[in-house]
Image (spheres, rainbow, N blue to C red):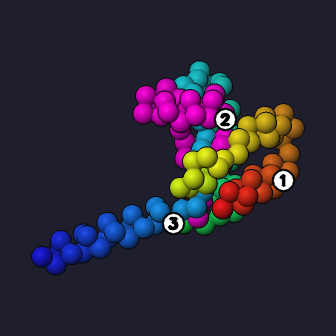
Amino acid sequence: MKKLILISAIALMSGMAVMAQKAEVLYFKAQLGCCVARACDMLQNDIKTMVESNFDASEVVFKEVRLADPSNAELVQKFNARSQTVVVVRNGDSEKFKDISTEVRNYLRFRDREEFESTLVASVNENL
C-alpha cells in the first residue's frame, strides 16, 4: 500500500512538472546524409545548449521533432516545418508561437552566436 501511495505521488509530481513548463522550443529535423547531418546536429546542439543555459527546465523545454515520424505529422503540417525549422511555442496555447527559422538561417550564415542567442532568448521570453 505504501508503494502504491509513493508511486502515485511521484506520478502526480512529474505530471505537475510537465504542466509547469511554460514554453517549448521545437527543432524540426530531417533524416539527412552524413555530412549534412553533422551540420544539422551541431546546430541542434547549439540551440539546445542556448535554451538549457538561459532557462530553467521547469519553464522551457527543448524538443527535437523528427519530420519523418508519422506521430509528428500534425506538428509538421501546423508549422509548415522543414529541416532546421525552429518554433517557440507557449505551452497550453498552441496558437501562440513564433517561427525563428529565418534567424536560424542567419546564424548559420554569419555564425554570430551572441546575436542569435539574444534573439532566441527574446523570442522565448515573449512566449512565457
User: Amino acid under label 1?
Assistant: Glu
Q: Residues within 10 Å of mark 3 (few under 14, many from 20)?
A: some
Sequence-first tag of 2 and 1: 2
Q: Residues within 10 Å of mark 2 (few under 14, many from 20)?
A: many
Sequence-first tag of 3 and 2: 3
The local secondary structure at tag 2 comes to loop
Q: Quadrant of the C terminus?
A: bottom right
Residue 68 located within the stretch drawn in magenta: yes
* Residue sitting nearer the eye, 46 or 12: 12
Report the span colored magenta. Answer: 59-88
Quick check: 2 above or below 95? below
Sequence-first tag of 3 and 1: 3
Residue beneath the point at 58% across and 61% down: 22
Q: Nearer the viewer, mark 3 or mark 1?
A: 3
Q: Nearer the viewer, mark 3 or mark 2?
A: 3
Which percent across, then down, holds residue 36? 66, 25
Give the CA separation, mark 3 to mark 2: 25 Å
User: Amino acid under label 2?
Assistant: Thr
The answer to whether one can see residue 24 in this image is no
Quick check: 3 above or below 89? below
Tell me the tag on residue 114.
1
**Residue at the disc numbered 3:** 20
Residue 80 located within the stretch drawn in magenta: yes
Q: Quadrant of residue 110?
A: top right
**Residue at the disc numbered 2:** 85
Taking the image as shown, residue 76 lies to the left or right of residue 104, namely left
Taking the image as shown, residue 114 lies to the left or right of residue 31, namely right
